[in-house]
Image (cartoon, rainbow, N blue to C red):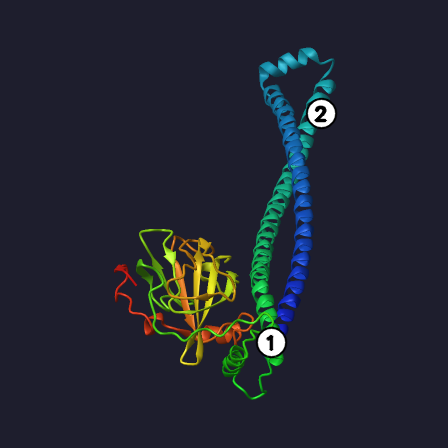
Amino acid sequence: EEVNKFTKDLEDKKNKIAQNDADVAQIKENIAQIEGQIKGLEQETEALQKEIDKSNEEIEQKSKESKELFQYLQISKGNTAYLEYIFGAESVTDMIYRMSVVEQLTAYNDKIMKELQELIEKNKARKEDLAKKKEELNKLTEQLEEEKEKINAETNTIKSMMPGIEEQLKAAQGNLKYYKDLGCGATEDIQVCQVRIDRQRAQSSSSGGGSIPLPPSVSGFYTPMENGYVTQEYRGYPGHMGMDFSSYNKTEPIYPIAAGVVFYIGYDACTNSWCPYGCNGRAKMIKIRHNVGGTYIYSTYGHLSNFGNVSVGTLVTPDTVIGYMGTTGCSTGSHLHMEITSCDWNYGGGCTSSQYNRSTINPRRYISFPSGLRQSWSGR
């Protein structure tokens, strides 16, 4: 059921990414069309401005001509100017003709200036309309850009989740095959089955191909470091499934909390889908399987700077150095993140990732740490 769930989840996310890509492509096409319209508006606005400038120049010229003609017409009505003008005319008829021409030219110029002024006002109104339209198109472009960013952000979030889902799917498929091959019954609890098979193998002195040997029975629990203090409690914030510790020695040696067998060495699979603060993982980590009264529990040690001289299947005691405190992965400073769970979602761990999240145990159940934060201890 978990395998089918992960498979469907992965397929849904791939389909969503494909749809998002199509939506982004359409938005880009719409933006390109709008940008083309904006460019056209800018060109039309530029042409209108040239017409306005040209009309203003013509109005200025006609105004100058009309002013000169009008001044002449006014002066010509005075006696002195009339007499001066009369001396220049060949006859009274010539003088009347000249004055009539002046009046007609002035009226014509007034008509032309009025038409040019109307054209200017019309062009200005059109220019304002174009500016308003351009502003609307710019706002639409901004909205489309925001929508595109939202879709891209959603796609990036989905993509950041997919490696985690793919890894969980792979682990779930591996666990499914592992327990079928192990011979667990259809109604048998897989944890009980695992312990039963491990005991049978131990009695027959056969570890089986690539299997983890039966861990020794736990005789007591210890702190994971010689000197340290608590920096974060169990479930101290959403998604924090263990406790955090640090030490004044930022490369403090890390020890198992009890005797057991190294179950996993590698890096966490933390991705943006479930990492705190949306950061990526790749923290160095070790997992150890412990036998507590015939039941397995698992302890996890994360953010290590380096691993100790151990490998998967190594029997360890509380005195075995399994690594050194560090700040690898999603970390803001050198510390140890430790979890205790009743199962593990890695291959052969007996549960899926969702079950793993529900299987966490408060480390204080087994280990006596100082009650408050940053209250140091010495010795184990």
Residue 93 x, y percent position in the rendering: 74, 20
For mark 2, give the secondary structure: helix
- The one of 357 and 141 positioned closer to us in this rendering: 357
- The one of 114 and 47 positioned closer to us in this rendering: 47
Residue 7 x, y percent position in the rendering: 63, 73
| Circle nearer the N terminus (1, 2) | 2
**Mark 1 Cα shell of 10 Å, populated few (<14), some (14-19), many (≥20):** some
For mark 1, give the secondary structure: helix
Q: Residue at x 63, y 12 (%)?
A: 84
The residue at which mark 1 appears reads as 178
- The one of 34 and 352 positioned closer to us in this rendering: 352
Considering every residue shown, the one lying at the far top of the view is 87
Using the rendered view, name the quadrant where residue 201 is placed: bottom right
Residue 184 x, y percent position in the rendering: 58, 84
Left/right of residue 300 with respect to residue 138 in the rendered view: left
Q: Is residue 270 visible?
A: no
Mark whose residue sits in front, 1 or 2: 1
Q: Residue at x 68, y 24 (%)?
A: 102
Relative vertical location of residue 123 with respect to residue 15 in this rendering, above or below: above
Question: Which mark is on residue 101?
Answer: 2
- The C terminus, quarter of image: bottom left
Relative vertical location of residue 255 with respect to residue 138 in this rendering, above or below: below
Using the rendered view, name the quadrant where residue 101 is placed: top right
- The N terminus, quarter of image: bottom right
What's the CA distance linking mark 1 and mark 2? 112 Å
Question: Which mark is on residue 88?
Answer: none
- The one of 209 and 232 positioned closer to us in this rendering: 209
Which three-letter amino acid code belongs to the residue tagged 2? Val
Query: Total marks drawn?
Result: 2
Which three-letter amino acid code belongs to the residue tagged 1? Tyr
Residue 377 x, y percent position in the rendering: 26, 60
Q: Is residue 55 visible?
A: yes
